[in-house]
Amino acid sequence: MQVVNKKWSLEKFLEVRKEVLSSWPTGNDPLLDLDVAVENLKKVPPHKNFALKLIEAKNQGRTYIQPRAGVARLKEHIDLMRHLDAAGADFLPATVDSYTRHNRYQEAEEGIKVSEKEGRSLLNGFPIVNHGVQACKDVLDAVNVPLQARHGTPDGRLLAEIIHAAGWTSNEGGGISYNLPYAKNISLADSIYYWQYCDRLVGYYEDHGIHINREPFGPLTGTLVPPSIAITIGIIEALLAAEQGVKNITIGYGQCGNVIQDVAAIHMALELCEEYLKDQDYKDVVVTTVFHQWMGGFPADESAATGLIAMASTVAALAGANKMITKTPYESIGVPTKEINAVGIKASKMVVNLLKDQKMKTSTPLKLEKKQIRKEVECLMKMVFELGQGDVAVGAIKAFELGVIDVPFAPSKQNMNKILPARDNEGCVRILEFGNLGMTQDIKEFHKSKLDERAKAEGRPITFQMTVDDIYAVSNGQLIGRPKIGSNH
Ligand code: 8ZB
């Protein structure tokens, strides 16, 4: 498939839409008539509008919080949502099950049936497509906050149709960020095309006066992703979304662990995303930020996990992130119960509330880190535009083909998988092996010098062992994977 970054005509969108809606029986629903959906969306009160509430967070300098959660059965899912609403969540999700993420609706259907029979959820999320529009409307009616779908679906077109028609005013994902971490064999051209559709649907609603938020998935593989790579991908997806008519975009970033680097990353995600959108002539797009609590391996101990959650909340608040995705003390165990999910929400909320009138002051180290991120993102974005001769979709696809953009540890064959990250001596995520990454010599030397400091302090050479040690460090209670005293490293 050949994709270019150009707004789909209404005719093309409506043509493809017929095919999308006929891909599963719940797509054949009078509630999916666009005029009906527009009328329903107009009835969603402002306090349940995701886009408006994020703008409020931005204007008030607040960090709102959102958990992940989803179960197989509608009634149990509604109970879960009410429980998390009562615990203080500012936004609610539906985390979608893995079958739905891969468009395997028949298996999801069986999962629902068995869950009904056994009286508990046997799916790892809420199967939105199987439940359909009315069920999703029922969920929205049962809560007091805005709803978003959080999934990981390369082709989430029918899912997007269903949630928006039900009044859910945000959708997470993007053609890159919901492909590379979640699929192996789906081409980027295909997933970018599917997400152009999802964005064009939002563009349609925006043309009808309805505000809908879109959120690229910032953490990607969740494992030592250098900030500049995450931000570059977020900016590319923001540009692709804006072209299709999206007006409210939340750029995401997963906690890396060094406080200064994390604050710098949130600041630069916002600043650079706004700049690139303006530069490309998308002038009326509102950008907000989301900080993900640690996405790597968690400590098994619940108190230790709660400590990590509290630290993440501190950084998100000091950075001024507009939203934060919370984890739970059961993260290392599996899908959380509603009770433990509420614990994560309350712990997080306590911290962001305590810190709501404090932001990190600027300092030389913060300025330097921000400058470095800017330099790297600008370098990658320049390569993308060059490769695409000005077209960001064409450029992004080529950049991944060549490894000019490369995400560490992605399962996808669309990713070169040549780069290796490692922490420096203060725990900032740096790049140890660049592969074909499109960065200048100057940038490579900076990373090398930072890793040299660590190597010297640890009395070992810069090696892949550092990467391995860093991957396991946090779950073992340390940020940096230092060699054990007495070991050979
Ligand atoms: C990429 C996101 C991974 C995170 C959580 C995992 C992990 C997945 C559910 C869930 C609550 C669910 N997660 N599925 N959390 N309910 N159904 O997403 O624990 O933190």
Image (tube, rainbow, N blue to C red):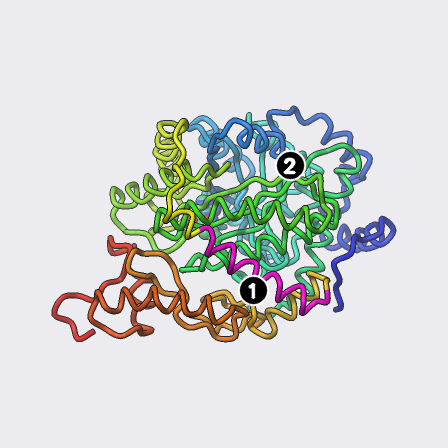
Q: Nearer the viewer, residue 272 or 116?
A: 272
Provide the secondary structure element on which disc 1 rests: loop
Res. 121 visible in picture = no
Asked if the stretch drawn in magenta spans residue 387, the answer is yes
Asked if the stretch drawn in magenta spans residue 466, the answer is no
Q: What residue type is labelled 2?
A: Thr
Res. 368 visible in picture = yes
Left or right: where does residue 350 sit relative to residue 129?
left
Q: What residue type is labelled 1?
A: Ala
What residue did someone put label 2 on? 169
- Residue 456 figure quarter: bottom left
Above or below: residue 41 compared with residue 219: above
Q: What x and y, as percent, mark residue 146?
A: 58, 32
Among the two numbered marks 2 and 1 on one chain, the one whose residue lies closer to the N terminus? 2
Q: Which of 56 and 307 is in front in this view?
A: 56
Above or below: residue 410 compared with residue 231: below
Left or right: where does residue 487 sit relative to residue 112?
left
Residue drawn at (41%, 69%) of the image: 445
Boundaries of the magenta span: 370-389
What residue did someone put label 1 on? 183
